[in-house]
Amino acid sequence: MKCLGPVLLGSSLAFADGVGVDALSRDGNLTRNRQLMEISDVMLGGRGGYMNLGFYYTPSPEQLPLKSPFGEHEGFAFRQHFGGFGAGSFAPGKYVGGLLWLDRAGWDGEDFLFFPKYNDFSVQRTIITWGLTYTDEKNHFAAALGMQHQNLEHVGHVYEHERDSLLGSWAYLRYGKASLIGNFNGADWSSVHLSLDLEHRSVYEDKMVRYEGWMDYLPNIDIGYYNGGDEDNSLRVIWNQNLYRQNLYGEIAYDFLPEVEFRSAALKYYPHPSRMIGFEATCLRRGVRSGAKDLLWGGAIDLLFVRLAYNAAYDYENFFGAKGTFLVEFKVDLASLDGMIFGRGAPQASPMENSVIKEKNKDKAPESSGLSLPSASSPEPKVIEARGIRYENKGGK
Amino acid sequence: MNRRYLAFLLLAVLSLGLTGCLSHWFIETESRLQVENATEDITLYGVDVLAEDSVNYEKWIDETILPGERSHVAEADWVGEFRVRIRYGREGEDTLKSIRALDIDGGSLFLRITAQDDTLVYTFK
């Protein structure tokens, strides 16, 4: 039994399936869309701050080889990602901010941090999304506008011909819990998303006390319509549903165009609704075989600074169809708002001591928050201050 | 400049160096191939890597190697599993093709070709 672990791990490395040339070519459009979906999550609040930083760690060159028409090349698929957002208020309840998302991804013959080898079969692509945001909290309104750029550092000769592009642009509009985000490339549209995030998220309503009620169980629905270019346009609906106390969620994605087909399903468990730690089991239809053999079953564990995944749907879709191997991703993904901290898209903030104190003192002194200094108008509260412990030497030695 | 600053600088350089980009110091990421024609009367016309469709190919060694001669060393990014094709023949006869699936680990490869009747025998050294 003892040697079973290493054998399993070894076999999972040895039988890891390669990433395809097509998947690497398609990734530019996928990344553009994913970045906007993440921005859409962050703009649900539209104020405060957000930071995301991370990269996949794949130590073995046999873990994610490149499958080209010539055979299987040993090397490394990579993705380095960054997302940042910050907004400040310029008038009561009104906020302006800026955001920047950056993904550098591709495949190279060497693993690297900054400087790839740029060999005949490698591809390095950077997608940059930036924008300016405006949020009117009282009127439940938010808008954002920005651009997207694609920079190809290097494209090996087995890939589809691609060029740098500065012409991507996007716009976001939210009223209440309904938001619309559009993505354009030059004069052509790339995708449109209509999102209804109906679930009650107490983190955006300045409530640190956990609300529990029927509004927690409203669904989050995303309807995405994608420009297929030469092929048919596609329509994908994602239904995200709280199943138990915002700890357990179910998510199902269904394609309605060009054909009505199941896409993926996931069961996600967050020990705390702040979503700093999460576990998920996923099932994805790959669209390469027929029947149940086509389904890819997998899962992931998210431990705040590291994410471990095996055949998870997210990695299959966003890491060039990586499957059949254990993936390690080092990352941070934190949003902050009014001193609260939570994961992206989380309905509640993580419990912190100062917010609990704040909440307790709210009833007693509504005009002043618990952390403010005593003012001259109110009588000075009795303060007992302990600076340390002094031991008295009572006789003896 | 004080010592603490220097130590910090050293730590920063070390931590940058240890972030995974060092593996190419001990993993070969390219192959350097030299072919020796050890046959008596067969000429090698070149070594290619063949694509799945058996039509497209990439040249690896693009030179004619006469019996008893060695090719130049050709450096290429072939590390992995590929189908390698050697074009060969006797003078005045048809060109034959020998196709093998080879697992290439990278680094320096010395391939000695001998012949048994009309088929080539590959020996890596």
Image: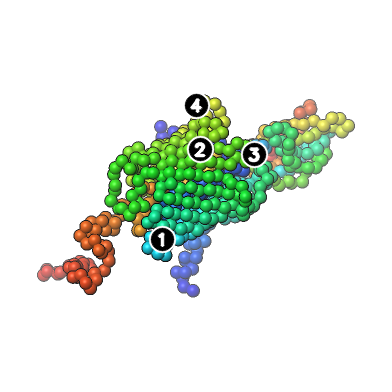
Badge 4 sits on which subunit?
A: A
**Residue located 33% across and 43% down the image:** A216
Q: Are marks 1 and 3 on the same chain?
A: yes
Residue situated furthest front in the rendering: A139
Pointer 4: what residue? A292
Residue situated furthest top in the rendering: A291
Q: Are marks 4 and 3 on the same chain?
A: yes
Label 4 SS? helix
**On the image, which quarter does residue B46 sit in?**
top right
Q: Nearer the viewer, residue A366 or A32?
A: A366
**How far, Cα to Cα, is label 1 from label 2?**
34 Å
Which of disc 4 and disc 1 is earlier in sequence?
Answer: 1
Amino acid residing under circle 2? Arg
Q: Position of residue A316 (x, y in %)?
A: 52, 39
Which of disc 2 and disc 3 is earlier in sequence?
Answer: 3
Q: Position of residue A269 (x, y in %)?
A: 37, 40
- Categorize mark 3 by other alpha carbons within 10 Å: few (<14), some (14-19), many (20+): few
Q: Are marks 2 and 4 on the same chain?
A: yes
**On the image, which quarter does residue A73 sit in?**
top right
Pointer 2: what residue? A236
Label 2 SS? strand
**How far, Cα to Cα, is label 1 from label 4?**
51 Å
Amino acid residing under circle 3? Asp
Q: Is residue A114 visible?
A: yes
**How far, Cα to Cα, is label 3 from label 2?**
18 Å
Pointer 1: what residue? A94
